[in-house]
Image (cartoon, grey):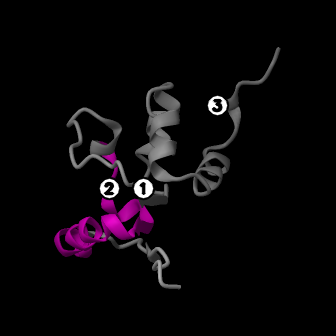
Amino acid sequence: MPAKVESLPPEIWLYTFQYLEGHDLIRAFAHLNLFFTSLLCSSHLRLNIRIKQNESNRRLPTSPWSKIHLSQISSLAAGQRKANCLIQFLRWNAASLLGLRSLSVYLRKSKLD
């Protein structure tokens, strides 16, 4: 009988998940089954979030994002055009970002260079 992927220990999944971008992780695993939903809600999960150009400011209350705690975010990154969104997010949520280890803003080269 073939083994199920859910038979791997949760620690292996959580270790693997740290290499995926948060949006992609949620999109790929959020509604697969109860096992993966519980992993995404685990306090041991660390997320790497990149605020993208087309990022919507709206989140549905029933989405998996509503179960993610801000303390699970270990890195935040944004491009130049989303830097203001990142600054506003940090102003409102800095006290809750207990697991944040990395903060990046990517700037484009000017046309003069």
Magenta stretch: includes residue 82: yes
Kind of residue sitting beneath label 1: Ser
Q: What is the magenta segment's predominant secondary structure?
A: helix
Residue 9, quarter of picture:
top right
Locate residue 91 relative to residue 72 in the image: left or right. Answer: left
Q: Residue at x 35, y 73 (%)?
A: 98
Residue type for callout 3: Glu
Q: Are marks 1 and 2 in contact (CB under 8 Å)?
A: yes
Q: Earlier in the sequence, mark 3 or mark 2?
A: 3
Mark 1 or 2, nearer chain start: 1
Which stretch appears magenta? 67-95
In the rendering, which numbered label is found on residue 85?
none
Residue at the spot of label 3? 6
**Residue 5 relative to residue 27: left or right:** right
Q: Amino acid at mark 2?
A: His
Residue beneath disc 2? 69
